[in-house]
Image (tube, helix red, strand yellow):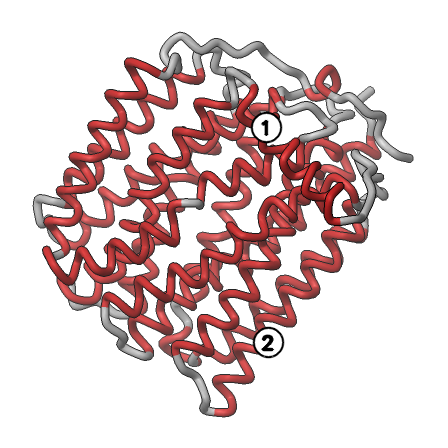
């Protein structure tokens, strides 16, 4: 009979996942909306703001991975989620006092990014610990289910954000903080999860452990091409998503809060629906080929945006981009989690987050200036051309086409027993 305690732990973890990213979905849209629509800032300011708010996560993500390997994960994650609620409340205070500015939004965004840099590796590493006693699904299925819950919850947050038109931003932020605290409560129901790696606390030892995680990430012939892939395409896609799409809604389609949230609902809707179907598939043997196919879909979606479609066709193209994005995220994350050793898992997953979002600061700032110089549609055309060139390069030279991965069941994959 399946372990009842293991299933309860799994459910509490996924509940915390849903609540945390429900709050995250609100925050993701809120900060962009405050700068682009509430404060009506220019493309350059929006691009630079996005760069500044994403940069701290990249700076601290490797330290976050090291902390997740060295600390007891349950209490570590509880503390971080409480801190996230406090950060959300600070933004509310700026609004109440009438002192909201771009710098106020950016300051809170920086605080959120630092917290996320520590929370994401801890949450990813805890997923392996919580699910390792389950026998009825593969690791790829579990990763996909976590993705589905993450993005489905973010959609709910983005839909809820539409109430900003009726009640204003302050009540929305208070709901967001309450969701983060609820996620912390769910995490308290998990068993303690001891540190996977012990090390000295001095700077030299920490630097060595971080460097060890970096080396391990690029030493594996299966993980290395994934890291290079994420860094390459992230530079293009993050700039388009965080800067160009909001400007299209505002300046081309003359939209407001509802239209702005629809682009995110469309994208994450595609991610969530596709993740659901992927969760029913036990395993893809040729994950590299599926990754190349997914990127072809992403490029096709971007190409449709260059044609100047009507608004709802525009949303449909964003939805298809999300469909391709779900397949891409499932393949890349499964390959990394499947092949990362338990002693380095959190650090390798932090490198995964680093390279996936590493292009965001540069891409956002660059997109803002390119839009000012060349126009929105020309920037998308440039992105399509660059993406096609990258895709052909990876298909020919990276070895992704012939990459094969074995089926890994959670119980077989576990390298440490679940604490009781």
Q: CA distance from mark 2 to mark 1?
A: 39 Å
The residue mark sitting in front, 2 or 1, is 1
What is the secondary structure assignment of the residue under circle 2? helix
For the point 15% across and 38% down, the residue is 303
For the point 75% across and 51% down, the residue is 187
The image quadrant that residue 164 belongs to is bottom left
Q: Are marks 2 and 1 in contact (CB under 8 Å)?
A: no
Instruction: Looking at the image, tell me whether mark 2 or mark 1 is earlier in sequence order.
Output: 2
- Density class for disc 1 (Cα within 10 Å; few <14, some 14-19, many ≥20) is few
Tell me the tag on residue 63: none
Q: Residue furthest right?
A: 420
Q: Is residue 13 visible?
A: no
- Estimate the x, y position of residue 140 in percent, counting from the top left: 56, 24
What is the secondary structure assignment of the residue under circle 1? helix
Q: Along the horizontal axis of the image, is 110 left or right of 120? A: left
Residue nearest the viewer, comparing 397 with 309: 397
- Estimate the x, y position of residue 310 in percent, counting from the top left: 12, 52
Q: How many marks?
A: 2
Residue nearest the viewer, comparing 262 with 350: 350
Please name the residue that numbered disc 2 is placed on.
89
For the point 74% across and 39% down, the residue is 69
For the point 68% across and 42% down, the residue is 207
- Estimate the x, y position of residue 6 in percent, counting from the top left: 80, 32
Considering only vertical position in the picture, is 219 above or below 54?
above
Q: Along the horizontal axis of the image, is 292 left or right of 43? A: right
Considering only vertical position in the picture, is 32 above or below 69?
below
Tell me the tag on residue 215: 1
Q: Is residue 24 visible?
A: yes
């Amino acid at each position: 009979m399946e372990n009842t305690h293991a299933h309860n732990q799994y459910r509490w973890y996924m509940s915390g996942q849903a609540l945390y990213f429900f709050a995250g979905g609100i925050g993701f849209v809120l900060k962009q909306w405050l700068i682009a629509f509430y404060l009506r800032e220019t493309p350059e300011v929006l691009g630079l703001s996005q760069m500044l708010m994403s940069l701290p996560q990249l700076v601290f993500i490797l330290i976050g991975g090291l902390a997740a390997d060295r600390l007891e994960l349950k209490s570590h994650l509880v503390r971080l989620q409480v801190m996230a609620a406090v950060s959300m409340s600070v933004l509310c205070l700026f609004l109440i006092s009438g002192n909201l500015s771009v710098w106020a939004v950016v300051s809170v965004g920086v605080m959120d990014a630092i917290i996320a840099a520590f929370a994401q590796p801890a949450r990813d590493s805890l997923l392996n610990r919580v699910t390792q006693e389950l026998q009825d699904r593969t690791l790829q299925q579990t990763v996909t289910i976590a993705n589905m819950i993450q993005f489905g919850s973010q959609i709910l947050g983005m839909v809820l954000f539409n109430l900003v038109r009726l009640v204003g931003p302050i009540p929305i932020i208070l709901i967001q903080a309450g969701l983060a605290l609820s996620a912390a409560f769910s995490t308290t129901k998990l068993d303690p999860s001891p540190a996977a790696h012990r090390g000295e606390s001095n700077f030299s030892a920490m630097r060595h452990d971080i460097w060890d995680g970096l080396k391990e990430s690029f030493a594996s012939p299966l993980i290395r091409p994934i890291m290079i892939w994420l860094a390459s395409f992230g530079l293009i896609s993050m700039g388009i998503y965080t800067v160009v799409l909001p400007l299209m809604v505002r300046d081309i389609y003359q939209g407001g809060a509802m239209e702005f949230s629809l682009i995110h609902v469309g994208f994450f809707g595609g991610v969530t629906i596709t993740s659901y179907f992927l969760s029913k598939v036990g395993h893809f043997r040729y994950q590299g080929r599926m990754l190349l196919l997914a990127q072809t879909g992403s490029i096709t979606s971007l190409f449709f945006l260059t044609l100047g479609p009507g608004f709802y066709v525009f949303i449909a193209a964003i939805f298809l981009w999300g469909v391709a994005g779900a397949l891409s995220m499932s393949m890349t994350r499964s390959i990394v989690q499947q092949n990362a050793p338990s002693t380095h898992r959190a650090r390798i997953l932090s490198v995964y987050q680093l390279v996936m979002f590493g292009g965001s600061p540069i891409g956002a700032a660059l997109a803002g200036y390119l839009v000012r110089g060349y126009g929105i549609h020309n920037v998308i055309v440039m992105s399509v051309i660059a993406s096609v060139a990258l895709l052909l390069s990876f298909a020919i030279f990276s070895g992704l086409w012939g990459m094969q991965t074995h089926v890994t069941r959670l119980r077989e994959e576990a390298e440490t027993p679940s604490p009781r």
